[in-house]
Amino acid sequence: MDWRELANCRGMDPDLFFPVGNSSSVAALVQIDEAKAVCSSCPVAQQCLDWAMHVDPVEGIWGGTTEAERRAKRRRALAYRNTARTAA
């Protein structure tokens, strides 16, 4: 069974997970919070996040994260790998 079949967002309006407009506008922030609330109790949120991290760049809320949050996660992971490589 594909992880997407178990996702909390399955059958929901996909527009919820793709905020429109400036990401710091009140409307977008409310929409992001609502989407993340759906993700917070999702049994496959980690698989969703893993997919979004692998496919980059992907817009919208995936695995409870925004595109900007996933970019920051990638930068931290890269910095950690570089530090670990240098220390070895």
Image (cartoon, rainbow, N blue to C red):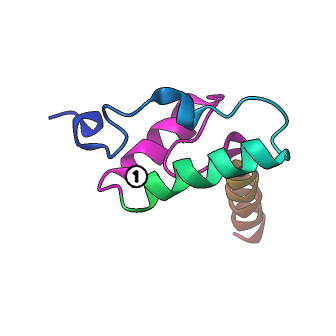
Query: Is 1 left or right of 17, judged from the image as shown?
Result: left
Name above or below for residue 60 compared with residue 64.
above
Count the marks: 1
**Point 73% across, 50% down: residue:** 29
Tag 1: amino acid: Ala
Q: Residue visible at 29% across and 35% down?
A: 4
Q: Is residue 65 left or right of residue 7?
A: right
Q: Position of residue 83 (x, y in %)?
A: 77, 65
Q: Quadrant of the C terminus?
A: bottom right
Q: Residue lying at the far left in this picture: please name it.
A: 1
* Residue 81 in picture, x, y percent from top left: 68, 58
Tell me what residue is drawn at x 22 percent, y 33 percent.
Answer: 2
Q: Position of residue 15 (x, y in %)?
A: 55, 28
Count residues near mark 1 (Cα–Cα under 10 Å), then give few for <14, some for 14-19, many for 20+.
many
Q: Quadrant of the N terminus?
A: top left
- Residue 40: horizontal and vertical position, in percent? 45, 61
Residue 59 appears in view = yes
Residue 3 lies in the magenta stretch: no
**Above or below 85: residue 74:** above
Magenta highlight range: 42-71
Tell me, yes or no, whether the highlighted magenta stretch contains residue 59.
yes
In the rendered image, which residue does mark 1 sit on? 45
Seen from the viewer's position, the closer of residues 69 and 18 is 18
Picture residue at 56% right of the left edge, 51% below the top: 34
Instruction: Return the residue found at the far front.
Output: 27
Q: Is residue 22 left or right of residue 58?
A: right
Secondary structure, mark 1, is helix
Q: Is residue 68 visible?
A: no
